[in-house]
């Protein structure tokens, strides 16, 4: 029975999806969920798969696939902003599960669509095989390999093994764009030089003379022997790297320097991703969409850079899906935070109690606080908003700190 089901749903579908509970929400919603999962979506996937093959063969559609532990969505949006300058582009919407989002996005293509950009986030073993069954990319971009979804992958090596399937598939068939600053990707690229394009420090595509001014970042793009000024309407070194990934991809597609420069200058940051806003007299860094150890340290670094001569505070929520290594990584973040002159830190969520246990030893219970959920935070942070603080809000999305930021803004 399982084999018949897998044949219908797709032989490449990860076993996790066969075990996923889709009922329990009431008779009407359960019936709808069953019809969608077992009938509508399998048909939709097959239509999307063969429509994609048709567009590639007869209309020269170029497909860019993006994966990585962080920076996928921003890189996708930056590439789209560049390619949209003079081309018909379709790209993944928001951060919907790629299991559903990929076929939906493919079916938005028209005969006139020149580029299709797909975000391929993975959480479970076998997902990348499933995506590559549906669509055959021409360019693959891998932004990073970091400790994410360890609850399912068990180790960073497990994360690497799944995400690198995109590069393995494209090796010899297409272009693979890799972040040279990432240890795992650097090693892979050195072993598989055929059609690998590196970006980042000490690579053919790197950023030098990086400068930050208010909410903007500028740098000189060094591409072999040429230099080009790049201006971004976003902050953070991680966004510089994301823009380099977008540039490397665009160069491989033959996009002009003018379109690259204009596209990146027009790019607007995604909501709740290192967004800056003013609430009363305080500057807020809203990075509440996602959280993992590497992204958390990048956000903390930005907090430190923006806070010269100012009081600083942080509201830190759980980094989720880290499995057995959750305690270790939360304690590491706590140690990182003890190096800052924090005036207040509020830890939010069950896992963040480990952060609290570390920072409390350094700052004491007049500066350090722990609460179980975001609705308990307000009383610890509202009094700071009139005092010209720089406050970082950082958490995995399901912790709900994005709702807290919206609430404080009103």
Image (cartoon, rainbow, N blue to C red):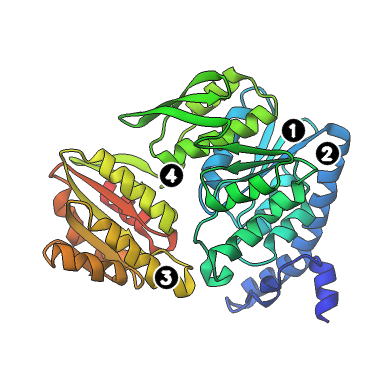
Q: What's the CA distance linking mark 2 and mark 3?
A: 44 Å
Q: What's the CA distance linking mark 1 and mark 3?
A: 43 Å
Which mark sits nearer the N-terminus, 1 or 4?
A: 1
Q: Nearer the viewer, mark 2 or mark 3?
A: 3
What residue would you read off at disc 3? 326
Image position, residue 12 (x, y; %): 78, 65
Q: Nearer the viewer, mark 4 or mark 3?
A: 3
Badge 4 crowding class, 10 Å Cα cut-off, few under 14, some 14 to 19, many 20 or more, is few
What residue would you read off at disc 4? 271
What residue would you read off at disc 1? 113
What residue would you read off at disc 2? 55
Dividing the image into 4 quarters, which one contains the N terminus?
bottom right
Image position, residue 32 (x, y; %): 68, 69
Q: What's the CA distance linking mark 1 and mark 4?
A: 27 Å
Q: What's the CA distance linking mark 2 and mark 1?
A: 9 Å
Image position, residue 351 (x, y; %): 36, 71
Please name the residue shown 58% across and 41% down the image.
76
């Amino acid at each position: 029975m399982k084999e018949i089901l897998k044949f219908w749903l797709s032989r490449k579908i990860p076993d996790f999806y066969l075990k996923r509970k889709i009922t329990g929400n009431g008779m009407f919603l359960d019936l709808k969920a069953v019809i969608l999962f077992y009938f509508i979506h399998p048909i939709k996937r097959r239509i999307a798969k063969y429509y994609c093959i048709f567009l590639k063969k007869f209309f020269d559609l170029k497909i860019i696939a993006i994966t990585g532990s962080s920076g996928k969505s921003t890189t996708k949006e930056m590439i789209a902003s560049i390619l949209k300058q003079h081309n018909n582009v379709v790209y993944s919407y928001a951060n919907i599960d790629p299991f559903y989002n990929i076929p939906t996005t493919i079916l938005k293509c028209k005969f006139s669509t020149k580029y299709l950009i797909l975000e391929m986030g993975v959480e479970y073993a076998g997902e990348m095989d499933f995506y590559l069954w549906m669509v055959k990319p021409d360019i693959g971009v891998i932004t990073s390999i970091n400790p994410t979804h360890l609850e399912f992958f068990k180790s960073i090596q497990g994360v690497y093994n799944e995400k690198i399937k995109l590069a393995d598939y494209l090796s010899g068939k297409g272009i693979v764009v890799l972040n040279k600053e990432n240890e795992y990707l650097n090693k892979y690229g050195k072993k598989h030089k055929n059609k690998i394009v590196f970006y980042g420090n000490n690579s053919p595509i790197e950023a030098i003379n990086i400068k930050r001014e208010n909410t903007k970042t500028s740098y000189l793009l060094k591409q072999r022997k040429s230099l080009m000024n790049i201006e971004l309407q976003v902050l953070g070194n991680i966004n510089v790297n994301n823009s380099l990934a977008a540039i490397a991809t665009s160069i491989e597609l033959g996009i002009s320097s003018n379109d690259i420069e204009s596209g990146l200058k027009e790019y607007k940051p995604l909501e709740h991703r290192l967004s800056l806003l003013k609430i009363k007299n305080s500057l807020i860094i809203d990075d509440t969409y996602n959280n993992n150890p590497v992204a958390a340290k990048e956000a903390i670094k930005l907090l430190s850079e923006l806070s010269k001569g100012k009081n600083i505070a942080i509201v830190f929520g759980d980094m989720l899906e880290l499995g057995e290594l959750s305690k270790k990584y939360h304690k590491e973040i706590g140690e990182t935070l003890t190096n800052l002159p924090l005036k207040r830190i509020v830890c939010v969520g069950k896992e963040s109690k480990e952060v609290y246990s570390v920072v409390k030893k350094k700052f004491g219970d007049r500066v350090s606080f722990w609460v179980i959920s975001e609705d308990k935070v307000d009383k610890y942070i509202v009094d700071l908003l009139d005092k010209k603080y720089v406050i970082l809000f950082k958490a995995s999305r399901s912790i709900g700190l994005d709702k807290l930021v919206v609430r404080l803004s009103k």
